[in-house]
């Protein structure tokens, strides 16, 4: 008599999704904070399949943003508030927040992001980070649909021309876009070489990545700027001058070999 045998399947370990740290640098953004963080948290809670946290980093605000961020974190369990007293700039805020996020994925956006772009872009960026260590949103990708305030558009064109002139091998269409994603531990390696804290940090971190052979993937995003919704914390002409000075400093650092792993 033949004896029946039973196939015993080998149980596979469950797939563990990496923790997403979504960093939002905040500078004098109190009026938009609760609304925009609420939009972001509600979207991620309903659509993102993995674990996440939103890290609000107050960049030395003078309008009570730090207290507002703490109040939001008290009622939204997936929101964490950090910060410091003296303004450092967007890059400084991102680096400070990322120091407390040693593993997983890091995506950052400006506070205005939920009002200017479709939040579905976050899902696509998280997916692409599974195969690329650096993923950046581009308003100027062929598949993007972009509407900009004319003054910001003019200054942005001048900035991109300067980047192409000074960093011909960078080959990215939108280096200063405030929506980028990174994998850890690669992001920590980039930031250990970073010397910029303000607006030029965005350019610098891409220059460091390209210098050391890390792939940079661009993805399209839809972008709609509305004057009445846009944050008043940005002084375009002052910040453009600061970016140009930072651009020259990044080029000098690159030539001096300060960006090598």
Image: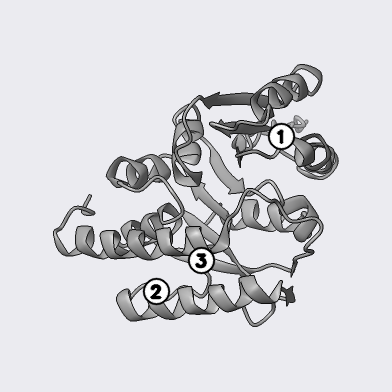
Residues 255 and 170: in front is 255
Q: Is residue 139 above or below residue 9?
A: below
| Disc on res. 75 | none
Residues 133 and 142: in front is 142
How far is the residue under mark 2 from the one under mark 1? 62 Å
**Residue 98 visible:** yes
- Judged from this view, the residue extending furthest toward the top is 74
Q: Which residue is mark 3?
A: 217
Label 3 near label 1: C-beta < 8 Å? no
* Number of numbered discs on residues: 3
Say whether disc 2 or disc 1 marks the residue closer to the N-terminus: 1
**Residue 13 visible:** no
- Residue 110 shown left or right of residue 85 in the figure: right
Residue at x 77%, y 54% (from the top left corner): 119
Crowding around mark 3 (Cα neighbors within 10 Å: few <14, some 14 to 19, many 20+) is: some
Q: Which residue is mark 2?
A: 163
| Disc on res. 7 | 1
Residue 63: quadrant of the picture: top right
Residue 106: quadrant of the picture: top right
Crowding around mark 1 (Cα neighbors within 10 Å: few <14, some 14 to 19, many 20+) is: few
Q: Secondary structure at mark 3?
A: strand
Q: Is residue 205 above or below residue 26?
A: below
Residues 58 and 142: in front is 58
Label 2 near label 3: C-beta < 8 Å? no
Residue 155: quadrant of the picture: bottom right
Residue at x 41%, y 76% (from the top left corner): 171
User: Nearer the observer, disc 3 or disc 2?
Assistant: 2
Say whether disc 3 or disc 2 marks the residue closer to the N-terminus: 2
The location of residue 196, given as percent across then percent down, is 35, 48
């Amino acid at each position: 008599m033949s004896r029946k045998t039973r196939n015993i399947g080998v149980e596979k370990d469950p797939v563990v999704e990496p923790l997403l740290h979504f960093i939002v640098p905040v500078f004098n953004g109190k009026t938009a904070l609760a609304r925009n963080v609420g939009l972001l948290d509600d979207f991620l809670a309903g659509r993102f399949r993995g674990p996440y946290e939103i890290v609000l980093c107050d960049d030395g605000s003078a309008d009570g943003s730090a207290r507002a961020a703490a109040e939001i974190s008290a009622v939204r369990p997936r929101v964490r508030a950090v910060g410091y007293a003296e303004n450092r700039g967007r890059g400084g805020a991102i680096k400070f927040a990322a120091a407390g996020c040693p593993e997983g994925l890091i995506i950052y956006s400006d506070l205005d992001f939920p009002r200017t772009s479709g939040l579905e872009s976050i899902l696509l960026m998280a997916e692409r980070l599974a195969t690329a260590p650096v993923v950046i949103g581009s308003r100027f990708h062929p598949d993007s649909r972009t509407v900009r305030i004319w003054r910001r558009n003019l200054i942005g064109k001048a900035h991109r021309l300067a980047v192409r002139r000074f960093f011909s091998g960078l080959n990215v269409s939108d280096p200063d876009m405030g929506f980028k994603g990174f994998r850890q531990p690669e992001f920590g390696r980039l930031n250990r070489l970073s010397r910029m804290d303000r607006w030029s940090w965005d350019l610098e971190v891409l220059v460091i990545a390209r210098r050391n052979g890390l792939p940079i993937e661009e993805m399209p995003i839809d972008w709609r700027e509305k004057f009445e919704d846009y944050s008043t914390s940005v002084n375009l002409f002052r910040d453009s001058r600061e970016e140009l000075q930072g651009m020259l400093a990044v080029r000098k650092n690159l030539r001096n070999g300060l960006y090598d792993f």
